[in-house]
Image (tube, helix red, strand yellow):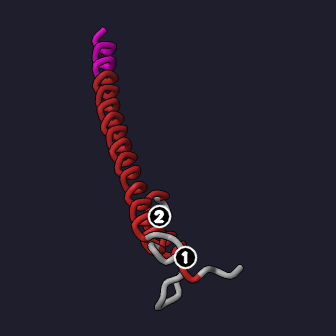
Amino acid sequence: MKTPKYYKGVQYKIEAHEVIEDFAGDNYNIGVCLAYLMRAGKKKDNDIIQDINKCIDHLKFELKRQKHLDEKKDLQILEDLINENTDSTYKQSNTKR
């Protein structure tokens, strides 16, 4: 399959997906954003502003996702602390009986 020119870099002819896999292979939204930026305005009849806005949309979604993950981590830490203290209190009360 022949790769369109807008998928490759000009100087080294590296394909966008290779760069994305190397730098952001574990994060879909950041990877897609990079792809939009690397190809921004290069595809025929494709407005550069549209590509930049698509990247921004993916970054905004990723920011929300990361904040949600942080909140879940915070809740898990709190839950672990509560469970740790509950277990400790339970063990102490059982040993005194």
Please give the residue where the numbered disc 1 appears in the rendered image. 44
Among all residues in the image, which is located at the extreme top? 97
Please give the residue where the numbered disc 2 appears in the rendered image. 31
Q: State the CA–CA distance, disc 2 to disc 1.
A: 22 Å
Residue 33 is drawn in which quadrant? bottom left
- Give left or right: position of 44 versus 94: right
**Which dot marks residue 35?**
none
Sequence-wise, the earlier of marks 2 and 1 is 2
Q: Is residue 84 visible?
A: yes
- Give left or right: position of 42 versus 78: right
Amino acid at pointer 1: Lys
Among all residues in the image, which is located at the extreme bottom? 11
Q: Which range is magenta?
A: 89-97
Q: Does residue 42 show up magenta in the picture?
A: no
Q: Residue at x 34, y 29 (%)?
A: 79
Q: Position of residue 10 (x, y in %)?
A: 48, 88
As helix, strand or loop, the secondary structure at mark 1 comes to loop
Q: Position of residue 76 (x, y in %)?
A: 36, 35
Q: Residues within 10 Å of mark 2 (few under 14, many from 20)?
A: many
- The quadrant the N terminus occupies is bottom right
Query: In this view of the protein, which residue sits in the foreground, 39 or 81?
Result: 39
Q: Position of residue 3 (x, y in %)?
A: 63, 80
Residue 73 is drawn in which quadrant? top left
Q: Is residue 93 above or below residue 75?
A: above
Among all residues in the image, which is located at the extreme right? 1
